[in-house]
Image: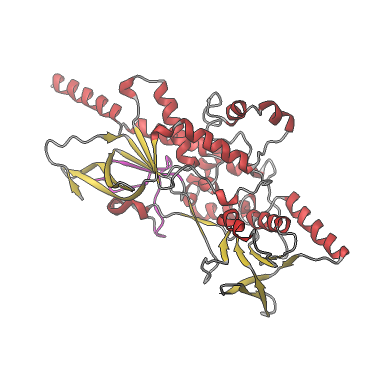
Amino acid sequence: MSQVLPGDAPLVHDLIGIGFGPSNVAMAIALREHNAGVGPGEAVTAHFFEQQPSFGWHRGMLIDDATMQVSFLKDLVTLRNPASRYSFLCYLKSRGRLIDYVNHKNLFPLRVEFHDYFEWAAAQVDDMVSYGHEVVGVTPVVRDGLIEHLDVTVRSGEGLAVHRARNLVVATGLRPVMPEGVERGDRVWHNSELLTRADELETTSPSRFVVVGAGQSAAENVAYLHRRFPDAEVCAVFSRYGYSPADDSSFANRIFDPAAVDEYFAAPEDVKRRLLDYHGNTNYSVVDIDLIQSLYRQMYQEKVTGTERLRFVNVSRLTGVEETPDAVRATVTSLVTGEETLLDADVVLCATGYSPADPFAVLGEAADHCLRDDQGRVRVERDYRVTTDPALRCGIYLQGGTEHTHGITSSLLSNTAVRVGEILDSLLERGLTSAGDGARTAADGAGSAAR
């Protein structure tokens, strides 16, 4: 731990953000809008650090015809502030496409378009972020046995620098997950890198792809590779009989409502588990019904014409991968018979999902003050603040990695706008900002005069 010496007066940010994906872009916008409506002494000072050289959100998955699975109204701001100038509709107006989009009669934008919206929004607050800066540690600053500041060590091309904060908001995103025993390589990819790696094959003539996974990304990857490489066979491998349709019906979608977060947070553990089981088919390992039907139609058409390039190896799983410089051999095992099938391919593509990045990996010594539950999971309050021991007065807020406490929306866009508003409210109510310091100083002074 670092000890503050008498006379030290470093610049202290009210909030430092770790990561600058959509969640912390939304946080920066909420702060910008708050600060625009208060006096200079009440503004919340903040800065964000992002290790990428520029804004980017799942760039390797921006297939040209893939659409979002949430309404455009669940953008970075609208559910918190419908009048915000940072909304998707304002973005469309700035791009000259507002009327065209209205005529489109579609709630779900292209994914590449929504990414452009995110870039547009991030550019509006780029004075609040330092790109190419990686947070490598967080050290509590101790004074009189209490911790009211955290020193954040950041690495960039200029070396290491330390920035001091009263609060942190951690939004380090998701990390790709590979099948057990399988590692990425030149010919073994995770779907997060699909578009960049597929470009490498433009000068070759691939003959077969093996795509592993049963979710939306897997199905999109199958359709994309089948279309982009018209001479190649595409083999989809999954443990089910077929893709399961996503339940996006109106009642089921209530699991994504802001009020559902309150209910989930207050529910007993057994009810939490049941809710995830009941409504996992709104998000996990499910596919839009239109895409399912399109793939089946394509498969059937090829059977009729005798030119089968689209194959589905179901009730099976990938059990081994052997890579050579010129090819990769996938071992696929039937879950019913145990029979092994060897598939020689140019690429094995694993669309096997993501897991939240461990926030403790960047919190360093500060993680020692964060409490866990009896299952070893981080304890999180309703306002997304990590539960800490009494000595740590700073707020450490999580945007992601809170599914066990806040439900299915933890890593999704659905509640991003609402969540950042709740975090901002918590910061202000707890008074751990420079404005709060002023208020406490004034109150202490009044108390001294009274005494």
Q: Quadrant of residue 46?
A: top left
Q: Residue at x 68, y 80 (%)?
A: 339
Q: Is residue 449 visible?
A: yes
Q: Is residue 387 magenta?
A: yes
Q: Position of residue 410 (x, y in %)?
A: 51, 47
Q: Position of residue 202 (x, y in %)?
A: 64, 58
Q: Is 311 contained in the magenta span?
A: no
Q: Is residue 145 left or right of residue 382?
A: left
Q: Which residues are magenta?
A: 374-399
Residue 191: image quadrant is bottom right
**Quadrant assignment, res 439:** top left
Q: Residue at x 72, y 58 (%)?
A: 226
64 or 77: which is nearer to us? 64
* The C terminus lies in quadrant: top left
Point 61% across, 48% down: residue: 62
Along the viewing direction, whichever of 109 and 158 lies nearer the viewer: 158
Q: Is residue 393 visible?
A: no
- Image vertical order of residue 47 relative to residue 268, above or below: above
Residue 69 screen position, x and y as percent? 64, 44
The location of residue 445, given as percent across then percent down, is: 17, 22
